[in-house]
Amino acid sequence: MNLLQLLNRIRLNGGEVGWREGQVFLKFRPGLLTAEEVEALRQAEAELSQLLRPKEESESYPFQWSGEQLGPEVGLDCETTLIEGFELPKLVLVSVSDGQRTFVLKPEQLEQFLQLHRDRSFVCHHTAFDFRVVEKSLRDPSDWWTVAEAGRLHDTMMLDQLIGLAEADSYPRPRNLGQVAKQWAGMDLNKDDPFRLRYAELLRKDWSSAEEGFFTYAAKDAEATVRSWQKMKLAAGKFSSVRRFGLLTEQLQTLASIALADITANGMELDRELVVRNRDAFADKVQGLIERLQQLPQAEGLFKQNRQKTLFVMNETSGKPSIHQKRLREILQGIAEEKELSPPSTGKTKELTTSVKWWGAYADEDPFLELWVQLEQTAKLSQFFGGLTEKRIHPKYSTMVRTGRTSCSSPNIQQLPREGGFREMVTAAPGAVLLTVDFAAIELRTLAAVCEKTFGFSRLAEVFRQRVDPHSYTAAMFAGMELEQFLQLPKSQKKPLRQKAKALNFGIPGGLGAKSLVSYAKHSYGVDLSVEEAEDFRQKLIAVVYPELELYLREDAALIVAENLKTDRQLVDQYLPASVLGAAKKIVRGSILKKDGEEYLPTFVDRVWNCLKGLNKNPELRFAIEQRKAGEGLFRKLFWTPVETTTGRRRASVSFSQARNTPFQGLAADGAKLSLWRLYREGFRTVAFVHDEVVVELPEDSDYSAEAEKVVQLMVSSMSEVMDSDIPVEVEFSLSRRWWKNAEEVRSEDGQLLLWSPEVPVS
DNA sequence: TGGAGTACACCC
DNA sequence: AAACGGGTGTACTCCA
């Protein structure tokens, strides 16, 4: 039984725990503790006495800091008042440790401590919190800023995730200090720290008479943090060949996490009236569609009803009744037969697709389809109102997912629909305007930078250097025109060509095959391509338009296998020539059928496994290969490859497409992240971040042109720094009261930046 | 009834 | 020979 848990339970249930007249004093309501628990407390009196006895006046509290200087790496942990809402809590106590010596500081000692340690590195666990708390509590935060700017600010929570990515491409989940310290430093931290939620009490207490636990628990965290860091550094060091942004980009991610936490705290203002109006309009539309569907005999039994069959089972957020999927599939099957359609079976279940996207193409051929598709679409959009119930929303950002991008939730502002007037419901706070800045075609620029670095040349880079729009450039090539000629075309002819080019430019570098390209182009850009056309375009794009892509999209499968087997590639070439290697992939994955539907001959399958066995010098794979453990797991271990960004972040084992995608997507993300930090550093109030778009609130009547110029300059220079290239980075920006989808840069005659106002009023 | 698994739709 | 990646949120079904 945990003594401290018991004490905490008493406290939390209105009891008292303390010291009175020379002995332990416990008061709690009868029945709160079992007889055994009461007995346990009695037994532990000596221990309790140690814990609760106030110290003598002359006694110092444990770990008291009095000017000592610590080693080069300092673990730091803030204890604060309870966290409420999005305001930063008040700093109560700071613990610091270099792994050998550990101290606690009063907030008023912090400035002196930092001054003395201004050239040290600092490590926190969840730095986004500690950094901001410390920063706010200092009168002069310049030393603290210096630590961050000089790349001496670290985060064990972040590095732990980055190492997981580098070792196993595991999804980056923040782990608490207990787990991290256990793994890395072998330290057991008490999960039920009874003082964790009580630090506000210390504010009003004389520290020398406070219970020891306030200090011992806090101290342990700083110590665990720095010790974990020291071990993690060694583990991360094995991977990092590039360290411009710290081990595995840890320094950059740490800075980004601070900026992102600030964005969350800032929040976004909603136009409540508009939200309500739009929500009601959507609800009305859903209602109307339901009523019309009910009129159709075809739709019989579609909606779920209660037992009495008097009411639909409604979904609260969308206002749509639940639908019997079985019945829906019956109806859809009927339509398919009648119209001689061949809808695909999807997913693991191999059931008839219920995809609105698929059926939507036939919506005008059948009254049921028409209504059902509309209903699903409208209900889907209604769903987004669920996240927009407050006047001010505070979207939460994760600093890092597998590619290095951020993610967002509660609500996920990064996936707000572009159509339907959703973004427009976000407004500037009273007395402010929104400056929205987008990096233009940034992933193509980072791709060009990667290619140039890897192959020594990039046509795409040249296109950017000449300030040519790469989509127009591609379009012109495909239309068989000179760029000049293409640009002279009337807009109506230019636009569809450029749209097509856009689909190709964005899709193909990511590893898109012809088939996927067809659906991608259709869905993303409304462009119709045949598979043959797509294959043709693809070939032309990578061979003629941007020849570096041919290299970029090349895969040396034999080399990958050789590296995974820890053997020579010549041997792989010899025993598994390209034709066999392709088959080996299928066999290892568990397929027994060739592409033509025939089974592989048992002798061939034998040969493949025996070759793998003979080639393998990797002890970790021996067993699986010998046992012929065909399946996704072994497939990945044999045929997947690590990938690294030029910033120095690594994913352990990824597929072909992931390996193509991560370098430029991750690089763009890193550049955007550095921008966020710089904006924070310069005191801008950022309120949203959507991968390549930043929304900043500027005070009304400030010098918009100058402020915008500053923001743009910061963003461009940050991105360039991360790209490590002279490929130009360009942005588009606009100033508006709402987060308009189509807002554009507007200037007065004398060049001053003006508020953009919509051509079409809000619906 | 609640969690896991699945399918789908939204974003860049 | 063939390959887009990365997310979050909701609805629905199945099953203990």
Image (spheres, coloured by chain):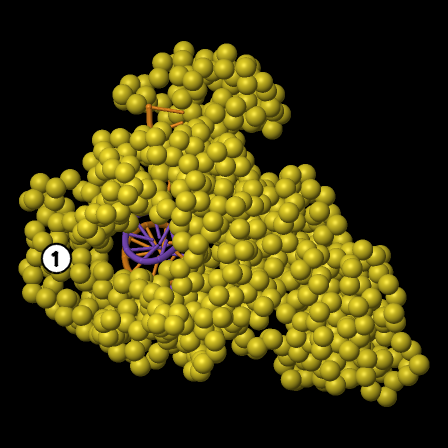
Chain colours: A yellow, B purple, C orange
Tell me the residue at 71%/66% (across/down). A144
At x 75% / y 50%, what residue is drawn? A230
Q: How packed is label 1: few (under 14 Cα within 10 Å), some, or many (20 or more)?
A: some
Residue A198: x %, y % from top left: 69, 77
The reply to whether residue A620 is in sight is yes
Location of residue A604 in the rendering, given as x and y in whole percent from the top left corner:
40, 13
Q: Quadrant of residue A553 in the image?
A: top left
Q: Which residue is denoted by mark 1 in the rendering?
A: A370
* In the image: residue A662, left or right of residue A100: left
Question: Which quadrant of the figure contains the N terminus of chain A?
Answer: bottom right
Classify mark 1: helix, strand or loop: helix
Which chain does tag 1 point to?
A
Q: Is residue A258 above or below residue A505?
A: below
Question: Is A106 situated above or below A248?
Answer: below
Amino acid type, residue under disc 1 in the picture: Glu
* View extreme (front): residue: A750
Residue A603 horizontal side relative to residue A623, left or right:
left
Front residue of this view, candidates A556 and A55: A556
Q: Position of residue A239 (x, y in %)?
A: 64, 39
Image quadrant assignment for residue A304: bottom left
Quadrant of the rendered structure where residue A369 is? Answer: bottom left
Of A412 and A467, which appears nearest the observer?
A467
Residue A598, above or below A54: above
Q: Position of residue A414 (x, y in %)?
A: 40, 61
Q: Residue at x 93, y 81 (%)?
A: A58
> In front: A743, or A157?
A743
